[in-house]
Amino acid sequence: MRTIICDLTRAQLEATGARFDAAVTREDLAAAHDCAGCFGCWVRTPGVCVIRDSLGDLGVLIARTKELWIFSQNAFGGFSPLVKRALDRSIGYLHPNFRMANAQMHHRLRYPDHELTISCWLYGPSTEAERACFGRIASANALNLGARLAGIWFPADELGAGAEKNAPAVPAAATQPHAPALPRRVALVNGSPRGARSATAQLLGDFAEALPVYARMAGVGRPELVRATRAELLEGCDVVLIGYPLYVDALPGGLVELLERSRGVISPGTRVYALANMGFYEAEQIVPSFSVIENFCAGSGARWMGGVAVGAGGMLGAIAKSPRMGMLRRGVSEAIDRLIMAVLAGSDAGEGLARPGVPRWAYRLAAEAQWRRLAREHGADLDARPADAT
Ligand SMILES: Cc1cc2nc3c(=O)[nH]c(=O)nc-3n(C[C@H](O)[C@H](O)[C@H](O)COP(=O)(O)O)c2cc1C
């Protein structure tokens, strides 16, 4: 069975001449919700999303699919917000427990015998950096889904016509007027759908609490902090810190949409940093997603200044009340402190990797025990395979 997920209307999809057995088109995506980040598809109704809209059974559809074709407009070298919405809503296809692949943590497969190939078309103008970024993200997606990546293509338009087309060059950030190095207004963006309850909020909260301490020590004025819940609030900020959880190896769909809306709002020369966390242990897995933000900066005249990637994010809530420089939190606290110093100095933060002070085996045991407990509490079977039901 071949399934197409695309941000084209059904009419546009039919105009491409592509043959398919099932399709999720722009109409379905636009009518659906973003993932809420609740993990209900793992612990309440395993394999099926608890939001019962047009994407509620996407995990089941993928489990019945042999060839998954994805047509998406290019969004900074990643999937468009609508296609990303679908991918974020599809994680019920996976099992919450872990397996090791390429010496890194990934999810176990809910349907281990299922063979899936993925082909991706990222249409519209793209830069070389965006195409390279997309290659890394699509490969990571295939690895996480236990699928074979059949190929990626970069057609110039949504009909699949033409060879790849270079995006128009944007003047390099260095040629734009620079904001002064000392930040006056710092925007904190929380890209987690879980909002105030998220690990992202916790990390941003830690940043916001520690920043005045470092500003005082450095003898510089304390910058104003703006909780930027909408793109318009980024206007006039000389630093933007983007906090987010890794969702399907990239930014959550809602955050990609916010970045799209911030083009033209964010001032040229604005310094952009990232503070990301993830469910797997190895923070390295976040790094390809930084390129999406870097591409956003390159396309909007902002300056990408690097960020901090935090692995084992599932642990952050549990250790929130332990001492900031205690064994469990120290690595993450120090990484945030280095980020603060970079923000205050207007310097590059590089790619900082950090995680709570727990060994991988203990993190894995704790996380898997938690999934089991939550499923039990909801009377759910963690190993359910709803796609096998007739
Ligand atoms: C839809 C979805 C996709 C996810 N994809 C990944 C992933 O690709 N890699 C990963 O390590 N964790 C992944 N996670 C786990 C989250 O990154 C992790 O739970 C994180 O700590 C959530 O942070 P938050 O509380 O700030 O939202 C995913 C979670 C969800 C809900």
Image: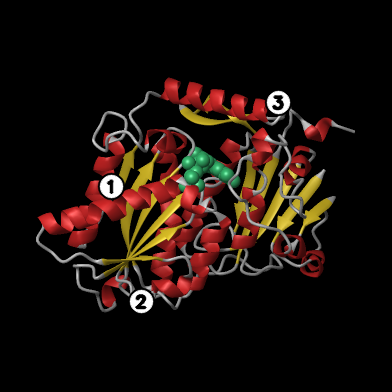
Picture quadrant of residue 345: bottom left
Name of the residue lying farthest toward the right: 390
Residue at the disc numbered 3? 383
Quarter of the image with the N terminus is top right
**Residue 370 location, x and y as percent?**
55, 27
> Looking at the image, can residue 218 be seen?
yes
Residue at the disc numbered 2? 267
Seen from the viewer's position, the closer of residues 96 and 64 is 96
Picture quadrant of residue 360: top left
Q: Earlier in the sequence, mark 3 or mark 1?
A: 1
Task: Name which residue lies at 72% across and 28% down.
Answer: 379
**Above or below 245: residue 96:** above
Q: Amino acid at mark 3?
A: Asp
Secondary structure type for disc 3: loop
* Number of other residues with Cα within 10 Å of mark 1, as a class: few under 14, some 14 to 19, many 20 or more: many
Left or right of 203? Residue 48 is right
Q: Earlier in the sequence, mark 2 or mark 1?
A: 2
Label 3 and label 1: CA atoms lie apart by 37 Å
The reply to whether discs 2 and 1 touch (Cβ–Cβ < 8 Å) is no
